[in-house]
Image (tube, rainbow, N blue to C red):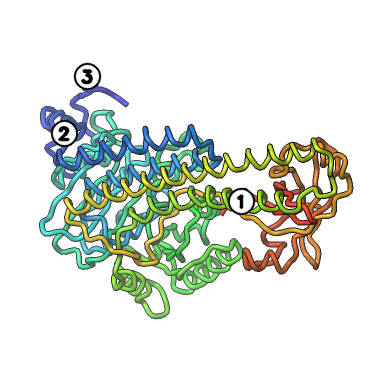
Amino acid sequence: MGNLSDFTSRTSPKEKVENRYLTNKDMGIELLAKLISTQSENNEIEIILHDLESMIENEFLALTEKDKCPGSAEAYANLQKAFQDLVEIVNFPELENKFTIAVGGQFSSGKSRFLNRVIDAKQLLPTDTSATTAIPIYILSGKQNSVFALNNYQGKTEIDDEALHAISHAFKAKYNLSFSHILKMIAVERKSFKWKNISFLDTPGYSKADSIKSRSNNTDENIAREHLRTADYLIWLTDIQNGTIPEEDIQFINSLQFDEPILFVLNKADKKIEAEINEIIQTSKENLTQNEIAFYDVIGFSAMKNQEYSPNKIVLQQFIEQINSQKAGTHIIKRFHDIFEDFLNFHKSEAEFLRVSRKTINDAFFEAYKQEKEHDKLKSLTRKQQKQITAIVNSEKSFDSLKKRINLAINDVFNKLNIEIVEGYAVKKRKKHHAKSEVLKFNAMVQIQNESELSKLGDFTKIKGIVTGIKAIGVSIQIMHQDKILGDALITKAEIRTKVNTDPKVFFSDFDDVNIQYLGNKMAIVEITKII
């Protein structure tokens, strides 16, 4: 990136219309100064956000340090991301309670020109955007025609349409100065935008023109992925000249882990005759099916002619209207709730197990061992477990209290922004920012073969195991300690179906690592962690 001393009087050869931010150096500097401003618009909300950030960065971390929960790092990362999304909502409350339809694709696939046609604003979005300077742009309905830019310091600035065109590409070409590392997003409001419950998101092309096969340093790819993952629905554009959906597109779409069926648009269809268009559509559908990508439909489209190529010619219209007809709700409150619930579920299951195993030990565990030292060992173990139960319960109360205070702070922010809080928001409003891990526990039957080695263990709650086979009756597990085989365990097929409602072969694999929590009397609990 350049600096202010790099400003020159160079003129981009691509400039077709004179732009005052490009022809007037002082106005260019003034625009830059506005866009990097960090001035806040709402001090009341800033105070609440500061308190909320402190709850996450200080109180939550302090509790996790005492708690030592395995899921604390993931929960902390998810809380940080949710907080940043809340800050974005504060800056653009108009985007909340709307479904976001993102438009994605490779660089030069025609996304901006396509969107200009869809929203019936031919010159609204810049169509000469460079792959290295593009910024995600949201388009939505508004009471006035306006453009707002949000920088990476959470500073929000109103700009005009001319500035939008300047900073998207021409500023880079004119002054060798890019805004891609300064601006986080741009929101464009239009009175003529006819869909009240949706916003469109124009994202950078995920591939640079000269580096499709070497994208490790591709900033635009990272920006595109980040924003596409937060969208509710996706329209994917590809140049019809490719003949199908390219392998690079398939790989990128898979990395998004998108839930909703995607509408695929073979753009620039005017370059083909109708028979070729139909053939490419069919090939693309077969390709998507083979790669197990859920799609709403595949259509051809020409932005030049503003024409759709499909059997009924209204697939795109139906896709948009179907989404707009739904009532979107705010998702952020439930996001915070789910993060804490996932985290607290670990405490609940751990405490319940300790209670069960403690009762089993007191009643029947190791009844065969009558020596006094064995009784002392059992008493010591039960005391240790009781302390663990008490610590987990107290920790759970502290986290639950913090969760309630965070929820109150978020509600306070929404009330001050006059954002309607919709309980049980529409199921279509999905937000999967990160893959999550889930700990599942199954009851198992145990056959101990090496009781003398087992008796040496001080802790029967975390014995290692490995899946050795998936059979008709269930899943076989070998119980190990320091490379010595202690015995075998079996989780029945019926038990697995009760807990996860799926075939064992879908959930378990040979050589999966598990934890065995031995309860005695030929019974155990098998614990396995899976990514969901």
Q: Residues within 10 Å of mark 3 (few under 14, many from 20)?
A: few
Would residue 445 be seen by someone viewing this image from the given angle? yes
The residue to which callout 2 is attached is 39
Between label 1 and label 3, give the one nearer the viewer.
1
Q: Residues within 10 Å of mark 1 (few under 14, many from 20)?
A: some
Q: Earlier in the sequence, mark 1 or mark 3?
A: 3
Between label 1 and label 2, give the one nearer the viewer.
1
Residue placed at 76% from the left, 46% from the top? 465
The residue to which callout 1 is attached is 355
**2 and 3 marks in contact (CB < 8 Å):** no
Alpha-carbon span between mark 1 and mark 3: 69 Å
Q: Is residue 254 left or right of residue 92?
A: right
Q: In which quadrant will I find the C terminus?
A: bottom right
Percent x, y for residue 74?
A: 49, 42
Q: Is residue 274 left or right of residue 167?
A: right
Between label 2 and label 3, give the one nearer the viewer.
2
Q: Type of residue at label 1?
A: Arg
Q: Residues within 10 Å of mark 2 (few under 14, many from 20)?
A: few
Q: Quadrant of residue 495?
A: bottom right
The residue to which callout 3 is attached is 5
| Above or below 194: residue 404 | above
Decide which of 270, 454 is in the foreground and name it. 454
Residue placed at 19% from the left, 32% from the top? 38
Q: Secondary structure at mark 2?
A: loop
Percent x, y for residue 275?
A: 48, 74
Q: Secondary structure at mark 1?
A: helix
Q: Type of residue at label 2?
A: Gln
